[in-house]
Image: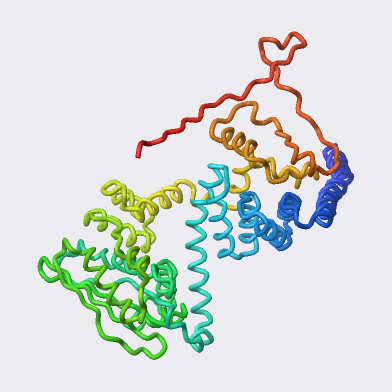
Amino acid sequence: MRLVRTILALALFATIAPPLVAQGNDAIAKLEAERARRPQNVAALRALGVAYYKAKRYADARTVLDQARRLEPKDGVSALYAGLSAEALGDLTSAKAAYNAYLSVGRTRKVKNEIRARLVSLGREEALAAAKAAVANEARISQTPGSPRTVAVPPMTFSGTDSSLRPLERGMADLVITDLGRSQQLTVVERDRMQALTDEIRLSAGGGVDSSTAVRAGRLIRAGNLVNGAIVQQGTNLRLDARIVNVANGVIGDAATVNNSMDALFAMEKALVFQLFTKLGVTLTPAERQLVERRPTNSMAAFLAYSRGLQARDDGRFEDAARYFDEARSIDPGFGAAVAQAQAMQTSSASGQQATATTIESSITSSNEARTTESAASSGVIRAVEPLATTLTRVAADVNPSAATDAVVTTSADRATSIAAPTTTAPPTRDPTTSTVPIDRPVSPQGTVTIIIRRP
């Protein structure tokens, strides 16, 4: 009897499965026809791109969605699915760029939280993959010299009796990277990329490294110049030294040096950076100089906690890193870098391992923004770029959802851009107190928006 049931079940599946596949292909065919009819219509391109993604045609999806984004850069759904498609294709750089675009223009808070967590993981994966590829292709990469305008800054080296200051190796290098990056004339290698490459070299060398490791890493990362820095404790004073190393030939330039009390650490870093700009032949604009002169924090305690967080993160101690970044943020709430790192680590520790392309896509299905993707699954209505009033209504519904937000909002733009297709309408919501009589009382959406205008 069990065998008979199994055979019947398989026969039933065989009769159902082909129509389901045909239905999906038919939906894509209709969307492709609509794209051919209106090749510059963002809504048609977006719907087709989403349909391609759901059909696992990731290359086709990215091509169509990128076209939609060029036509309408503020379309969050196109950016989201472009990121998902790029990630599925293994292009982590493009995926990160598209996800960051969604953070700027997207409307669904839950999706943004998932993306922030995913970006932390993608950053690590991208840096590690690039490092592995560079070491594997070292013979070829080494033959191509880096641009002299591309600069890498490895961690500084600390020497002194107070070991609690050792994390400044990471923190000071981070400040130098940020400040050198203020100039439009320089391309500064990201700290995480340099650290990942150094770690990969260490692994390839069986755990041992020598003084040439930083230069080797700089060559593999195609930097033309390397900034080798040192922090020397001299009683209650600190001395900062930095030398520019030509990666191609290993020639070491003259040292940039500043010396002052520990309380003047941030002023010392600025003086050191200005010397480095001069040695690199960079003339700053007044606006760039003003940006360099900004101090991220005035609290030595906050900066030390931040530096410990960088050290812990480099060592893979992510829980410790989150605690240190949060400590830095608590000491100085205006320390932007500490706030950003604390938020990233907290989001990552809360859901970082679970934040995947699948969870990102599922997060959007419960929001009003998901309505723009319905046509891709059913070949139904293709929504155009909606008017401001509708956008405000949907944003308010995301902030203060109600039972009525599940109703489909149809605008004149929707009607003008619809594709003829069978649609189904959900039954109206019936008020419980009148369920026994033929009177429908749909629930009215209610919400409160508080606008605070501060007196200048």
Residue 427: horizontal and vertical position, in percent? 76, 24
**Which colour style is shown?**
rainbow
Q: Is residue 312 above or below residue 410?
A: below
Q: Does residue 315 appear left or right of residue 434 in this picture?
A: left
In the image, residue 163 sits, relative to residue 137, either above or below, namely: above
Question: Could you tell me which residue is drawn at 28 percent across and 49 percent down?
Answer: 332
Q: Is residue 229 above or below residue 293?
A: below
The C terminus: image quadrant: top left
Q: Residue at the front extreme?
A: 456
Q: Position of residue 304 (x, y in %)?
A: 25, 58
Horizontal relation, residue 140 to residue 321: left or right: right
Q: Position of residue 2 (x, y in %)?
A: 82, 38
Left or right: 269 in relation to 226: left
Quarter of the image containing the N terminus? top right
Between 441 and 313, the one lying in front of the other is: 441
Tell me where residue 450 appears, x and y as whole percent.
Answer: 47, 30
Q: Residue at 39% x, 67% y: name it.
A: 182
User: Residue furthest toward the left?
Assistant: 235
Q: Is residue 401 above or below residue 334?
A: above
Q: Quadrant of residue 255?
A: bottom left
The number of numbered discs placed on residues in the rendered structure image is 0
